[in-house]
Image (tube, helix red, strand yellow):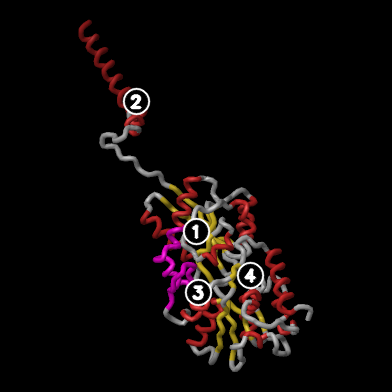
């Protein structure tokens, strides 16, 4: 009986030792194996990283959503970087302001003119220029880089001649000759780059276009209602009017593409303080600014910020005009900066008239 009892105790002891061995090996041995230069059969799995990208649109651009375009690029990027997920959020400027006020901050942002002031203090210096045209990137002050571009165009219906830009501001009409949106961009800067003589006829400007907050879409609608004769529009207006021509809703429309200036730029900036995430955010930006992805901007009717041509259709002539060096708006303008720019350009065009 005594022998049997001792054997039982031995068996229990062995069982306890085995149990401790099973429990302690993952805790004590595996971390040691991970630190070996080439652990036996052990493969380190990359850590999953989530980056939040906010898109804030402030201007009318091409023919489709810039946010949806970036979301598709995020999915494609994840396929090549299986442990990286770029999570898209499309916000208005007011929504972004509320989020920041509540301590919620993105890892990087895509934004248009007028939104940059809100984020400037969060933006970190970028490590490269990503091959973007130098005339366009200068507006980013080393903290933002454009990833797509829009342009301005004069539009008129019927026999209203817009071939000579100088004449547009020297024609008297009952309601005003020229209308444009005045909300988050300074369209008159584009006109100013294309006139050779100043005007004394400020009444040529449609009155609503002198009121801050008047949207580009409102200008488009008023143009179709013939409240003024010439629309200083964006390529979104060009797309809308071309579409109306193609379906027979308009019989005739004239276009004069304006080079020299644009503030219709969508910018990238990095806002995270996590250095490892900063690297990944720049990798995504570099991917969007690759020539292959820039070619896909035709899907949304935007122009490339690289020194390449991507159009062979009705956008090709517009693209050609914008291919020469452009003055650009500052990525970090706020509403007061835009209003100051508007006052300055009115003074330049009309003087004391």
Label 4, secondary structure: give it: loop
Question: Which residue ends up furthest to the bottom in the rendered image?
Answer: 159
Specify the label residue 129 is tagged with: 1
**Quadrant hosting residue 155:** bottom right
**In the shown orientation, is residue 166 left or right of residue 72?**
right
Magenta highlight range? 285-311
Q: CB under 8 Å between callouts 4 and 3?
A: no
Residue 236 vs residue 330, the one in the foreground: 330
Q: Which residue is mark 4?
A: 185
Q: Of the two numbered discs 2 and 1 on the same chain, state the one appearing first in sequence.
A: 2
Q: Of the two numbered discs 1 and 4 on the same chain, state the one appearing first in sequence.
A: 1
Q: At x 63% / y 78%, what residue is drawn?
A: 191
For the residues carrying marks 2 and 3, which lies nearer the camera in this image? Answer: 3
Q: Report x, y in % for residue 114.
A: 63, 64
Residue 125 vs residue 55, the one in the foreground: 125
Label 3, secondary structure: give it: loop
Q: Compared to 44, does 177 lie above or below?
A: below
Residue 230 vs residue 29, the one in the foreground: 230
Residue 272 vs residue 170, the one in the foreground: 170
Q: At x 52% / y 51%, what residue is drawn?
A: 107
Q: Report x, y in % for residue 287.
A: 43, 59
Q: Is residue 290 magenta?
A: yes
Q: Which residue is mark 2?
A: 24
Q: Give the quadrant of the C terminus.
A: bottom right
For the residues carrying marks 4 and 3, which lies nearer the camera in this image? Answer: 3
Crowd class of label 2 (few under 14; some 14 to 19; many from 20; radius 10 Å): few
């Amino acid at each position: 009986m005594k022998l049997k009892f001792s054997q039982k105790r031995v068996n229990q002891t062995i069982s306890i030792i085995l149990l401790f061995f099973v429990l302690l090996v993952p805790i004590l041995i595996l971390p040691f194996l991970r630190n070996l230069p080439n652990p036996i059969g052990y493969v380190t799995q990359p850590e999953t990283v989530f980056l939040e990208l906010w898109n804030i649109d402030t201007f009318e651009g091409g023919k489709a959503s810039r946010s949806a375009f970036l979301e598709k690029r995020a999915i494609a990027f994840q396929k090549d970087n299986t442990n990286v997920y770029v999570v898209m959020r499309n916000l208005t400027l007011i929504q972004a302001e509320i989020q920041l006020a509540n301590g919620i901050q993105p890892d990087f942002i895509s934004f248009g003119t007028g939104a940059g002031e809100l984020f400037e203090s969060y933006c970190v210096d970028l490590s490269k220029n990503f091959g973007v045209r130098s005339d366009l990137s200068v507006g980013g002050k080393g903290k933002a880089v454009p990833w797509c571009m829009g342009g301005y165009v004069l539009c008129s219906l019927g026999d209203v001649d817009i071939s000579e830009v100088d004449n547009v501001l020297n024609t008297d009409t009952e309601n005003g000759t020229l209308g444009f949106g005045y909300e988050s961009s300074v369209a008159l800067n584009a006109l100013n780059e294309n006139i050779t003589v100043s005007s004394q006829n400020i009444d040529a400007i449609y009155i609503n276009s002198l009121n801050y907050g008047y949207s580009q879409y409102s200008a488009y609608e008023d143009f179709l209602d013939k409240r003024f004769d010439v629309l200083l529009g964006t390529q979104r207006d060009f797309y809308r009017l071309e579409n109306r021509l193609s379906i027979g809703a308009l019989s005739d429309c004239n276009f004069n593409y304006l080079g020299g200036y644009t503030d219709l730029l969508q910018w990238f900036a990095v806002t995270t303080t996590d250095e490892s995430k900063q690297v990944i955010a720049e990798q995504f930006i570099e991917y969007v600014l690759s020539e292959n992805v820039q070619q896909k901007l035709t899907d949304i009717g935007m122009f490339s910020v690289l020194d390449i041509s991507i159009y062979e259709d009705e956008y090709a002539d517009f693209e050609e005009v914008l291919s020469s060096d452009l003055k650009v708006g500052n990525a970090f303008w706020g509403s007061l900066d835009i209003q100051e720019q508007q006052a300055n350009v009115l003074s330049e065009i009309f003087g004391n008239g």
